């Protein structure tokens, strides 16, 4: 996930041209995407919002961190994206939304309490796993929803979400030891905590786990000749797959969420759409039954994998675009494999296929001569790295 960045300004270059001796400016105009997103003031990471929030006091400053934590689920460090995530969550289920927000507050608060890096906290690094934990625990608890509240569910959400920040810090320290370039922990803390709870809840009479989690990938095989797909449902499943990144299952939520990505990065917006489309088409090609495809269960992992590798944690170019496509494909195959592996113990794959894919590609990137993974602390939005080098400023031309 993303942390605050220190911008690196490219060194000027010089060139020689034929002609009379004269001085000429060779500065290039920044491309459109950089002018819209790369400066970060109207789109991008909106740093001026953090500065304004800090000037308004600790509460508003904390609120800015919470909103950025919501966006970090999809690698977006942008408070407006966080606002749209809340809107999409309310459209989907206000109960799940409230449990997710409670988890977000607890994990971010725990990071503050333990004195973790302020810049990382403010960028939402310790918020997104807590939000996912809170939402998952609410989703996988049978009989509790919008029309059937249970205050007892607050207890595990508070405790488990707070623990996710501790796991995140521990994994981050571990990753610094195994990689030449520091790599993010992605959603691995969320998986450690959520799987721990769901496994244990099979014995908790007060907090039983849903034996058929909503994000479990069915492993039953259907005769390929009997499978047919509805075109309208396939189109909708692309957006439902995007919504499932946040445990949402409504088409409307998916539309809001893809616009939330667009608000911060057109590159990530494109990667998310392509990942969702690729996941849907590949699931059809593999002969997956229609129902899980329509529910978006084969789309959300390639969405995350494509965004992560397609310009967010690598410089965007043709090679990394190809890598992003391969990462999306790998996450799709892992979705089926992990779903089959975990089915006997009643666990859903969640976003583990995307997380482990991103980790593997970042580790592999250390061996690439031209496409090293980016240091997380320097990551903002892909457009921020599209600014052309200002070709040198004064060139003497000699006959």
Image (cartoon, grey):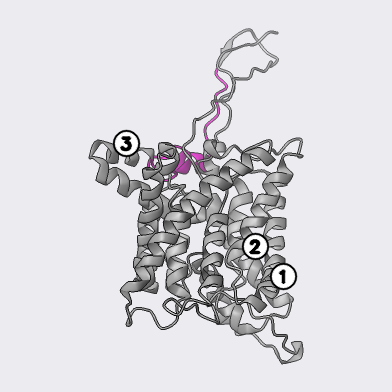
Q: Identify the mark at residue 337; answer none if there is no mark.
A: 1
Between the residue at mark 3 and the residue at mark 1, the CA separation in whole angstroms equals: 45 Å
Q: Are marks 2 and 1 in contact (CB under 8 Å)?
A: yes
Local secondary structure at mark 2: helix
Residue 42 in view here: no
Residue 146 in view here: yes
- Magenta-colored segment: predominant secondary structure: loop
Question: Magenta stretch?
Answer: 25-46
Q: Position of residue 396 (x, y in %)?
A: 62, 9
Q: Position of residue 57 (x, y in %)?
A: 23, 40
32 within the magenta span: yes
* Residue visible at 63% across and 7% down in the picture: 21
- Dot 1 surroundings within 10 Å: few (below 14), some, or many (20 or more)? some
Tell me the residue that label 2 is attached to: 353
21 within the magenta span: no
Tell me the residue that label 3 is attached to: 51
Q: Which sits earlier in the primary sequence, circle 3 or circle 1?
A: 3
Question: Front-most of 78 and 139?
Answer: 139
Quadrant of the rendered structure where residue 174 is?
top right
Depicted 205 relative to depicted 17: above or below: below
Q: Which sits earlier in the primary sequence, circle 2 or circle 1?
A: 1
* Residue visible at 32% across and 78% down in the picture: 149
Local secondary structure at mark 3: helix
Q: Identify the mark at residue 173; answer none if there is no mark.
A: none
Q: Position of residue 67 (x, y in %)?
A: 37, 52
Between the residue at mark 2 and the residue at mark 1, the CA separation in whole angstroms equals: 9 Å
């Amino acid at each position: 996930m993303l942390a605050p960045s220190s911008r690196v300004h490219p060194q000027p270059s010089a060139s020689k041209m034929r002609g009379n001796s004269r001085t000429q400016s060779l500065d290039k105009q920044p491309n459109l995407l950089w002018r819209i997103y790369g400066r970060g003031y109207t789109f991008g990471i909106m740093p001026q919002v953090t500065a304004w929030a800090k000037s308004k006091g600790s509460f508003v400053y904390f609120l800015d961190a919470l909103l950025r934590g919501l966006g970090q689920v999809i690698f977006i460090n942008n408070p407006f994206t966080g606002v749209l995530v809340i809107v999409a969550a309310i459209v989907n289920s206000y109960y799940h939304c409230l449990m997710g927000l409670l988890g977000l507050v607890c994990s971010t608060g725990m990071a503050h309490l333990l004195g973790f890096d302020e810049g990382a906290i403010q960028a939402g690094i310790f918020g997104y796993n807590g939000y996912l934990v809170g939402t998952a625990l609410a989703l996988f608890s049978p009989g509790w929803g919008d029309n059937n509240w249970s205050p007892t569910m607050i207890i595990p959400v508070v405790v488990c979400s707070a623990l996710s920040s501790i796991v995140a810090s521990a994994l981050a320290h571990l990753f610094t030891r195994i990689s030449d370039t520091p790599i993010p922990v992605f959603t691995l803390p969320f998986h450690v905590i959520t799987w721990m709870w769901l496994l244990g809840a099979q014995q908790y009479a007060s907090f039983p786990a849903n034996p058929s989690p909503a994000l479990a990938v069915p492993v039953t095989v259907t005769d390929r000749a009997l499978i047919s797909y509805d075109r309208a449902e396939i189109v909708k499943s692309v957006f439902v797959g995007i919504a499932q990144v946040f445990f949402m299952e409504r088409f409307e939520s998916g539309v809001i969420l893809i616009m939330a990505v667009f608000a911060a990065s057109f590159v990530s917006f494109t990667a998310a759409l392509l990942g969702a489309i690729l996941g849907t088409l590949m699931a059809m090609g593999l002969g997956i039954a229609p129902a899980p495809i329509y529910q978006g269960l084969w789309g959300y992992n390639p969405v995350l994998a494509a965004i992560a590798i397609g310009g967010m944690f690598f410089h965007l170019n043709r090679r990394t675009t190809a890598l992003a496509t391969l990462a999306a494909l790998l996450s799709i195959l892992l979705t089926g494999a992990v779903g089959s592996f975990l089915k006997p113990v009643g666990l859903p794959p969640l976003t583990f296929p995307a997380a482990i894919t991103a980790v593997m590609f970042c580790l592999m990137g250390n061996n690439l001569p031209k496409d090293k993974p980016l240091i997380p602390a320097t990551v903002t939005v892909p457009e921020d790295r599209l600014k052309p080098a200002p070709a040198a400023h004064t060139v003497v031309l000699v006959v």
